[in-house]
């Protein structure tokens, strides 16, 4: 594996990385890798997909409520 040395990390950023790493029980090094992976490999949602979601949301708006969801969930368990 490759090695990267980071220099001149602002104190605030370093402190925030340490807190985040501790929260997820990771080392600072592992947390930096996770942050880089999330930034580099996160998939972007295209406009066609978003427009489809918006149309679907508009078509069901007001038709689905908690009572309907509960009923459908129980029907699916039979």
Image: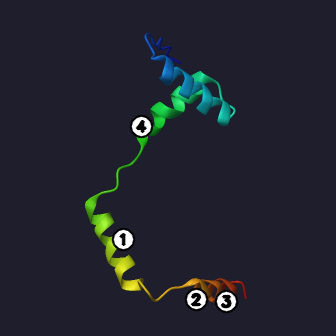
Near-viewer residue (1 or 45): 45
Element type where label 2 sits in the image: helix
Residue placed under numbered mark 1 in the picture:
53
Please identify, in this view, whether the residue under mark 4 or under mark 2 is nearer the observer. Answer: 2
Query: Between marks 2 and 1, how big is the CA–CA gap?
Result: 20 Å
Give the image location of residue 37, x and y in percent: 47, 35
Instruction: From the image, state whether disc 2 or disc 1 is nearer to you.
Output: 2
Question: Residue at left 46%, top 89%?
Answer: 63
Q: Relative to 2, does residue 33 appear above or below in the rendering? A: below
Helix, strand or loop status at disc 1: helix
- Residue 74 drawn at (x, y percent): 69, 86
Give the mark nearest the N terminus, 1 or 4.
Answer: 4
Which residue in the structure is indicated by mark 4? 39
Q: Earlier in the sequence, mark 1 or mark 3?
A: 1
Please report contact status of discs 2 and 1: CB closer than 8 Å, yes or no.
no
C-alpha gap between disc 4 and disc 2: 38 Å
Q: CA distance from mark 1 to mark 4?
A: 24 Å
Marks 4 and 2, the one that precedes in the sequence: 4
């Amino acid at each position: 594996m490759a090695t990267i040395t980071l220099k001149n990390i602002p104190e605030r950023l370093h402190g925030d990385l340490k807190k985040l790493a501790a929260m997820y029980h990771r080392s600072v090094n592992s947390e930096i890798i996770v942050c880089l992976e999330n930034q580099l490999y996160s998939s972007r949602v295209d406009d066609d997909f978003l427009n489809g979601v918006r149309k679907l949301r508009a078509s069901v708006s007001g038709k689905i409520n908690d009572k309907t969801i509960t009923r459908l969930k129980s029907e699916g368990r039979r």
